Amino acid sequence: MDFISPINVVAVSLGAAFFMGLLGKKAQTVSYILLLGALLFNTIVSGQWLYGLATNIIDAQQVYTAGFRPPFSINLLMGLDEAVITTLVNIVGLLGAIYMASGLHKKGSGSQVVYLVLIMSLNVIVLSRDLFNIFVFLEVGSIATAGLIIMQKGINAVSAGFKYMLATGIIASIMLIGVIFIYRFTGTLNLDFVMQSHPVLKQGALISSFLILMAILLELKPFPANGWALDVYESAHPGISAMLSSAVATANLFVLYKFTGMAGESLMYYISLIGLVTFVGSNLLGINQTNARRMLGYSSIGQIGLLVAIIGLVPHSNANFKLIFIGILTGHYFAKAGLFWIAGIVKAQNIKEWSVLRNRPVLLFLFLTFVLALTGFPPFPSFWGKWQLVMGLSQQGQIAAVIAILVGSFFEVVYLLRWAGYSIKLEPGKLPEVKLSQFIPVILFGLGIYATGYFVSQATNFGDTINYIPLVVVAILLVVDFLPAYIKNSLSILATGWFAYLLIPGQDTLKLVFTVIFLVGGILTLIPGFHVKGKRAGFYPSAMLMFGGLALLIEAENMLQFFFAWEIMTLGSYFLIIRGKESMVHAFSYMLFSVGGAYLILLGFGMVSVGNTGLSLNLLSQIKFYPVLAMALLAVGFMTKTASLGLHIWLPGAHGEAESDVSPMVSAILLKAGVFGLVLLMLAAGGEYNNYQGLFYTLGWIGALTALVGNLGAVFQEDAKRLLAYSSIGQLGYILFAFSIMSQLGWLTGFTYTINHFMFKAILFLSVGGIVMRLGTHNMYEMGGLIKKMPFSFIAVLIGIITLAGIPPLSGFSGKWLFYNAVIMKGWYFQGAIIFFAGTIAFLYCFKLIYSIFLGQLKDNHRNVKELPFWYLLPQYILILGIMVFSAKPDLILKPLGTALAAAFPSNPLIWEGTKALSQLGYWDATTIMIVIGTMFVILLIWLMLMSRKAQNVKQFNIVYAGERPERPELTHVSHNIYAGYNKALGFLVAPGITGFWNYATNLVESIGNFTRRIYSGNGQSYAIHLVSYIVVVFIIYISSI
Amino acid sequence: MKMKETDNQNKFLHEDIEKREVIAPDGSIIEIDPMQDYFCDARPQVSEPYKIKVVEKFLNWARSESIWVLGFGTGCGSIEIPPLMTPRFDAFRYGVQMRPTPRQSNAFIISGYLSVKTLKRVIRSYEQMQNPKYVLLWEVAPLTAECIGTVTIPLTGSICICRSTCTLPVACRAPKLYLPGL
Amino acid sequence: MEFTVSKILWTLLGLFIVLNWGLIMGGTMRKIVARVGKRYGIPIYQPYIDLVKNYSVRSQITHGVMFYLGPVFRLSGGVGIFLFLPLIFGSDHWSNFSFSGDLILILYFQFFGMLGMALGAGEGGHPYSAIGVSRGLSQFTTIEVPMTLAVISLAVQYNTLSISEIVAAQQGGLANWTMVTNPFATVAAMLSLLGAFGHSPFDLVKAPNEIPIGPPTEYHATYLGVLRTNAAILHVVEAALFMNLFFGGATNWFELILKTFLIYFWSVFVGVVFPRFRIEQSVQWFLKIPLILGIIAIIVVL
């Protein structure tokens, strides 16, 4: 196979440009075709080299010009790296030209020539090994870019182009000085020869390498000397912005990479610092943006900063350096180009207007793909890059850098996901007409990012252990999204059942509990979906994303699989939660807490991997690097999912506002994912005899206080679903507490609570969700007296609250009994008493829930409501059956669990004598209790019936009313603020202090951002001063440190 | 004429008792007729006394020894009821107790005059008592209503409705006079 | 332990005795209260007559199924505690079905009756019922805090949660009673008992003359009879629970009668002296001195 020499890129481009110039304005179409042809040629050349070098058909090749060898001539190097970068540049160049077809076509050959020259110059600076040559083509590129910027009409674009020229002028002069110095000290301008004189550079001519690197860095827009670039991103044609962000930045980054050989170690440190500051600072400022393109500009600068930091931080000899770099680079490259292109299609500036995307689901899907790719969610390339980066940095011990990267990423998540939320939820306006030429590049890039993600994952360490089957299921559901809901529902149930079938047999007991909760629970909570009519677009892919993530979580054997599953699940649940009518804000806060938690987990995993080899989850038991801190980070990460105190504020809204059948999914099932993480963590910590007593003691207190605050919060709710959501917080507090006890009884308590909470919360949320659906209101005081209309739901809710409250003989009591024994044996009396107090508080909201909804006075407008649909009742009654079995025969589950726990928690086991459980302290026989209470109840009922005369049914208002009669049911139903007295006594405990704290934190971040943003005055002169002073400041810091 | 009568009646009806329409969650309109929908107009179903005389006699004794009173104090007589429970008269020793709810009471003490406005409350309270029930009319007011000139019809009405068990047409105001009645 | 016929018969006999003692004790207490008020008071057999009368009312209404079941739940609560509580120490016949669960079961079984009653009263549709229930539940949450601390203190002290074993550990004279060995726990529990028995100053639930009689406003006739039966049983068994935990238990019926009488008398005694608290006062009261005493009780046994 013949390889076309890369020099032809220059030749063909220049030739084409020359002809286009000749053609003039008359033959626009011809010149446009010429342009496309030249770009296609470039792409083919670089693609061919990429193919050849990647498959080892050919070796890296030097191309010499003018018949001389360097240092007397300019040489180009085409290696694998260069091939990748030029391919990326040329692809975006080609697609960009297609995207801007109408613009380039209309403007005629002039702009087309400039465009072609830009792409050519980018190719050259990537390939060239000659300093001066690179300088020249950087200049050519800058001028071409400026030309393209002012192609857009309007004063803003012109002014931005001018500022761009100003900045690049300064940068060029700095670079030129550097080049002169280099020549003075080394006598050559060839990069390879310059590198060889590295020692000279280090000692005598520091300034020369410093200036050259600074110039390139400034070209990459470091924070805060980047105001000029922001204006460009905002006001240039989106196609140009895409080029700047994807192609120009990629090429410049590569130049920086090429030049780093000149710099000493100390300079690398500063490069990484500059990169990190840019990443964090730029993303921080991005939070305040409402202009989509400017926001993308911030994000762009931030991502480039991250890449700069990677060049500085990760040793280039590190085997994973290229993977990390390419992972994050391609994530940025595809996503940013795609987003800028979509921005051109949408034409809306304000991010709140982006809901127009909903008119074109494909476009929305692509938009979300790009946003999620930028935020580093799997399965996109940046996820793998970031994972590998964090792991690598941790292993180098650079935890501070990891933290900075995670903080910056978090800021980025904030504004990108807010934007995503707006586009999903706000009322859509009218979408401008979409041209096919604009649409094709976006689609291709969308496909490209998935493909790249897959390839990068395969190159990642342990990336080949990732199971993609759940994602395939999601993809299938996405494709068949046009089908009616019941078909997709059946498909989803089948798929979940299939996961369960694969996972359940042979699973060890502890994981089995969670498998059943996740997957059988998944099937049960999907059943109500049969009630939905229509298509229910987008629901099933999200649900299966979540359940698939949960299945993967069970399956995970190494940290990468675990984290992948965790992110997938988070993503699915986000899309589920945001479907609720009022859910936008709540889903957003859910996502922020989840992502924050996920980053803590990532950091924790990073610390776990320090000093260990491999990624196995078993490593959690042998943490070598600050074990307590690593454990704490992981625990807090999981606790964001279990909504423990301080991290709970997202839950009430997210669960309360979700759709009727989503609430049970996210409450009864999803919360258990956090519990699952904690269980894994605590098991790995060493079971009963661990070295983390202090940590678990703290967790115990947090659990106890969470239970108290959660339950107390529930008491004062008027919204039925929020009441249940607060109750979840409380229940998860119990669970956290119980597991923190770290004894066999404690863990049995934890498991009992987990199983119970799964069952009763699913029942309650299904009932209440169904009722909310029937009545169209969340407010309990607008309900009442529904027992006669919905007797089956009443029974379900009654069973649910009896289990919740822990009243014998139902299984809630098992938890309470185990809990008491565990607490007393552990010696955690005061925490235990708080939990007990919380438990009694649970009665308050249980009563309020069932009374306000089902008892009391029936409202006039609810006279004709029907019982809940069959599809809502079916799963509830299956779960009731489960509760009954677990209540009567708790030994069926607790006995094998005890055996399984005996390995980690050998002392003080629960002993079973038939159905009777014995602890060191007491005993309890659930079966007997069930029989005694059942028999007694029946006998007493018969007694009452025997003694009674015929009881006459009376109507609603036949009540004693002091000789008067009630007037309206609304005025007779005591429900609103029913616990006013209690609020007066203890309400101060649930004053929203924690919400206040988070509000304060958010405000602080925003005001810092706003304050810092003031440096971007929009004035070209100030920007010039920024640039110069930036160099001076960095130089002073740098020099003073040597 | 008939129309006029109903109009007249409606004039006295509280607006809450008028028919009204509400919108159900599914958007349909439901017509509410408070007088028909909220209240039960079925006659109380009273079961027969036990056939065995001894048992019934025993139960009657128990009923007589445990009289729970619903006080309906409308006039000057009502002030006499509280002293009934004070050390001086101590009705408790006869098993007499005051109950705050008609559901649990057996004896109904109407201790003052009745007017049209009060009558319906008397009837309502009376209907809410369970059988067997007794009524004690107290004071001259019910009987000497004509003299006072306020109520005439209610008088007969109340007697007819409540089948007064015991009437004490005495104008003397002394709590101890309740006791023989009870 | 098995459910033999003789065991069941003995238990029923025990229930009969407890019911009678409960009725008589209730009558006696009302007599005592009357005497404090310088009244002659009811005959002490009056509760029997009231009961017979309530069961013999000839008409009855119902607001619905849950309304009907409410009193059954309530009575089950009382009878259930009786069934799970060993009454007389060392006696197989009077230990009832206490082999099926320990102290925790009893503490939680109290809620069974409360919840059922609350629901029944709720279906009655009367506003006062709901207000009464909400007050009762509110008050109950904090009543249980010192009680829990006392129970935990006891469990630590005796290293058991079995009531029989706690009683066994107190045998051998006054000096071994929890009252002496763990006075703080006893005081904390006795203060929370005041709330649990619902006499003044903690009689907000029924709150005579304020929200007529709270939850049972709509209950009458046989329902009321069932509720009164329950009250009689419940007073004895709750007092017996405290007796078992703090006052050395009972080895024979006489001892049980005496001790339960005195324990019940304690709440009546306080009741005739103090007027009613408001709800927030009552809720907070238990979180003050009783709570501190409970904490001390735990610190002492540590």
Image: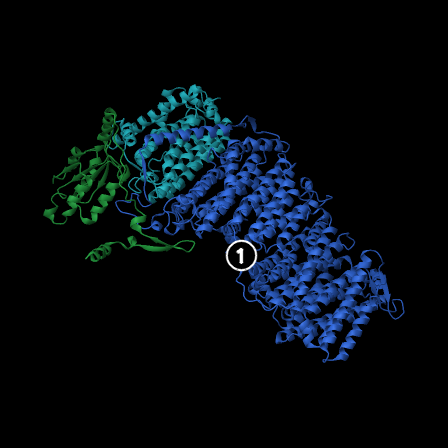
Q: Above or below — where is A834 with respect to A359?
A: above
| Residue A876 appears in the figure | yes
Instruction: Estimate the x, y position of residue A207 in percent, counting from the top left.
Output: 77, 65
- Categorize mark 1 by other alpha carbons within 10 Å: few (<14), some (14-19), many (20+): many
Q: Residue A924's x, y, as percent?
A: 50, 28
Quadrant where the C terminus of chain A is found in the figure:
bottom right
Residue drawn at point x = 41 percent, y = 31 percent: A937
Could you tell me residue A186's position as x and y percent? Answer: 84, 66
Q: Is residue A182 left or right of residue A931?
A: right
Relative depth, front residue between B13 and B29: B29
Chain assignment, label 1: A
> Which chain comes out blue in the rendered image?
A
Tell me the cyan chain.
C
Instruction: Looking at the picture, tell me which residue is in the foreground, B129 or A130.
Output: B129
Task: Say whether residue A884 is left or right of residue A107.
Answer: left
Q: Position of residue A302 (x, y in %)?
A: 66, 61
In the depicted view, which residue is nearer to us: C128 or A188?
C128
Helix or strand or loop: what does disc 1 sit on? helix
Give the quarter of the image for residue A382.
bottom right
Residue A174, image quadrant: bottom right
Specify the color scheme.
Answer: by chain
Chain B: its colour in the image is green
Residue matched to label 1: A584
Quadrant housing the N terminus of chain A: bottom right
Residue occupying the far front of the picture: B2
